[in-house]
Image (tube, rainbow, N blue to C red):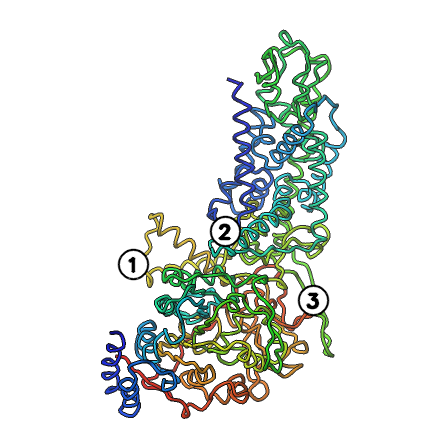
Amino acid sequence: MKRREFIIKSIGGGIVTGAGFSLLSLEEAFGNSIYNPRSAYDMVALMGGEAAEMFEKGIASIGGMERFVKKGQSVVVKPNIGWDRTPEFGANTTPELIAKIVEHCLKAGAKDVFVFDHTCDNWQKAYATSGIEKAAKAAGAKVIPGNNESAYKEVSVPGGKSLKSVKIHEAILNSEVLINVPVLKHHDGAGVSFAMKNLMGIVWDRSFWHRNDLQQCIADMVTCRKPSLNIIDGYRVMKKNGPKGVSISNVLLEKAQIISTDIVAADAAAAKIFGKNPETIGHIKIAAEMGLGKIDLTKLNINRIKIG
Amino acid sequence: MQAYLKPARIVISIATLLVVGFLFLDFGDTVPAAWFRKILWLQFIPSLFGFLNTLKDGLSLSVFGFAVVLLLTLLFGRVYCSYLCPLGVFQDVICWFSKKIRKKKRYRFTPPKTWLRYGILVVVCLSLLSGSIYLVNVLDPYSNFGRFFTDFFRPLYVLGNNLLVQLLQSLGSYALYPVKVVSANPYALIVPAAMLVLVVWCAIRKGRLYCNAICPVGTLLGLIACVSLFKIRINKTTCTQCGKCTFACKSHCIDIKQQQIDSSRCVGCANCLKSCDKNSIGYALASANKPKKVVPDKSKRRFLFGSILFMGALGGLSVKSMAISRKDEDETPKEEHHTGFEEAVKTHQVSPPGSKGIRHFTGSCTACHLCVSACPTGVLKPSLFEWGFFGMGQPYMDYHSSFCNYECVKCSEVCPNKAILPLAESAAPELKEAAEKDAQQSFETQFSRTANLSDAGDYALMQSMIQRNIKVRTQIGTVRFIRNNCIVYSEETSCGSCSEHCPTKAVRMVPYKGELTIPQIDTDICVGCGACEYACPVTPNKAILVDGCKEHGIAQKPDDEAVEEKPLTDFAF
């Protein structure tokens, strides 16, 4: 029933968005009554809707949450909850989006859905002020603290150049699925903060990264733990003074979202939305060179969905 | 009627111990911040110093607790020591347990340690006169209690919680969360540890010896108790001198041979009342059936002497504290060397927001460590020599282990002796005015109406907004960048950790070489929160640090210019 609904909707969406890509989507949808991962989109880009609404449409288009979460699996949904800032600042991921993702994971049969971040500000304040703790809990997630060193376990980074080993949160190690949900924003240290940068929130010692070529370390981390799915929240985009932001006037209401299995491509697309060439952003460029994903968006099968 | 005194005392004193103790243990914000000062209202030294610290700004009921204690003492003697002093109750609990262990334990009368106790009081008063709060800090019973709980019992409490968390998590429950133990410099705990040993030893071996030989508050109240209206006295006509009361007296102050009770040492615990089979001991009007004195009344003379000394000391202290605000010391800025790694040494340590400045803070804080245990980020730590030798134990902002949350005002809400004032009291008038105006504005944008200050909810909300607005512009220190130590300069790799954490962008990254950016500072908008210093990955000599402001200043408002670009109308790729 869901799938049929989606087909009807994507016909509508397709007419609006443009013939070429929507035709492809129709072909796929009609051609495969049972989902076939090989013919799926690499990326769904959305704009114009509310964060949760865009996710609903996007996840359906990329194959539904069932594609990533199997019955009985443990899932970590990793938002950005770095700062003691309200959602209006665009410093943290939109809480409604997290709630919706958690909902989908549970519906797909997840045993547990954990939500956490190794915050920069005091974790209790960040969890509360961001609105994420409340929203995620209400949706049925287990919101766990990320600021106790004992929860972090040493793992090796096989493909790392600067980062050879790293301590990451045990929730990640104990879960089959990692869903990476960063917020799209400016970042004074790394230039931008998208999907790859968000993985810094699953490690314990971040200052090591800062001491040992930050851009390289961010790319290296992808070789350690690649998220099953990346959902970049570009609903509110902090254009300057990131990552914490000084004022809500630093924020642009872009109403954008990118959903992709390719973390490098997702970041490259986010860079375009942010107004930057991905080639100029250290960690995106390095990650592409390391073969961790595609930086060239023309090589991707993207479904673009415009709402409203 | 007097038979109920002991049970009543036990109930009240246990309540004191539990409630005050919990203030120091709680890490879950269970107790609303507004209650702290109310709960601690009757604590003698905090209240007295709160009174002195706010004397310049007019009298306020919030600091009159000590006057109530004085009045109580004038009426009933040192009841404060048994009912309200948390350290006194703490000792009683130890006494009780030690008696349970050694069942045959009996107290006996001992002569007063006259030289010791008055000597200590005189030295404490003299040191206060000379402007040092250090001895009060070391000897004050409330502050000692606070240190015992914050420095020793709280870590145990937290540890217990963390073990419970592990157990629950292994069962799949995340109802509780682990808490970080605030690790103080172990050397800073030597003095509190020594005091803990002393107090516990006294309590086990000698009952209330600490209170009657060392505690300056006990000695002072003892002087007043000599002339109190009601006293515990022995009815000589019915007393059989069986000595049971003496055995029960933790204060060692019942001389059964003379059938006299030393009021300067009696803490009014009423244990003797319960012990007497003949009801021959109890509260009575001090003037009733008083035998004609053959010898001149020593106690009155002592009282007079003591009060004169004490009042003198207080007078001296308040004059001093007023003079302090005018006096300004010259300082020589540290010379900077420009070769290789530089030593990053602060010109001044940072005092917490609301403390007005270093002088006010170090001159008023008795180091009870309530702010240390209340601080949600754990940035406040007991000092060793950060404030100099005579500032030992007074908390300082340790930016190597944490930083001050931008909008948090917790410490300013809890400090009982107003070494850290509520921000609205500590702020300069122009800052307060601006904060009020901003609060009104944001209230209006949020609720589309003006705040009704006679409505309790509106009032509370406005107050918290004002506090917050003052906090984000209170400059407790200013940032200093040491380029030679910076990763971007020395390694030529990206970093920006400092700028990332800065809440005002007083540290921002500016173009350096190629795609690299390097920190640039603007001290005008810096609040001195220390986030940059904390985040700087270079250790131990950081590339960026915060020098404390001797007098707290006002930070300029940070840039909040709107973004010029418009949102995209179509896909960017």
Residue B449 is tagged as 1
Amino acid type, residue under disc 2 in the picture: Gly
Establish whether labels 1 and 3 are both on one chain.
Answer: yes
**Closer to the N terminus: mark 2 or mark 1?**
2
- In the rendered image, the residue lying farthest to the top is B237
Q: Position of residue A241 (x, y in %)?
A: 48, 75
Q: CA distance from mark 2 to mark 1?
A: 34 Å
Apparent side of residue A100 relative to residue A244 in the rendered image (left or right): left
The relative height of residue B257 versus residue B481 in the rendered view (above or below) is above
Which label belongs to residue B468? none
Give the number of the disc on residue B28.
Answer: 2
Q: Position of residue A239 (x, y in %)?
A: 43, 78
Task: State which tag comes first along the sequence, 3 or 2.
Answer: 2
Q: Quadrant of residue A155?
A: bottom right
The secondary structure type at the circle numbered 3 is loop
Where is the C terminus of chain A found, in terms of image quarters? bottom left
Report which residue position mark 3 lands on: B345
Name the spot of residue B123 as percent of width and height, x first: 73, 38
Q: Amino acid at mark 3?
A: Val
Residue furthest front in the image: A34
Residue A154 placed where, x, y %? 61, 69
Query: Residues under labels 1 and 3: Cα distance?
Result: 50 Å
Label 2: how many Cα within 10 Å (few below 14, some 14–19, many 20+) = few
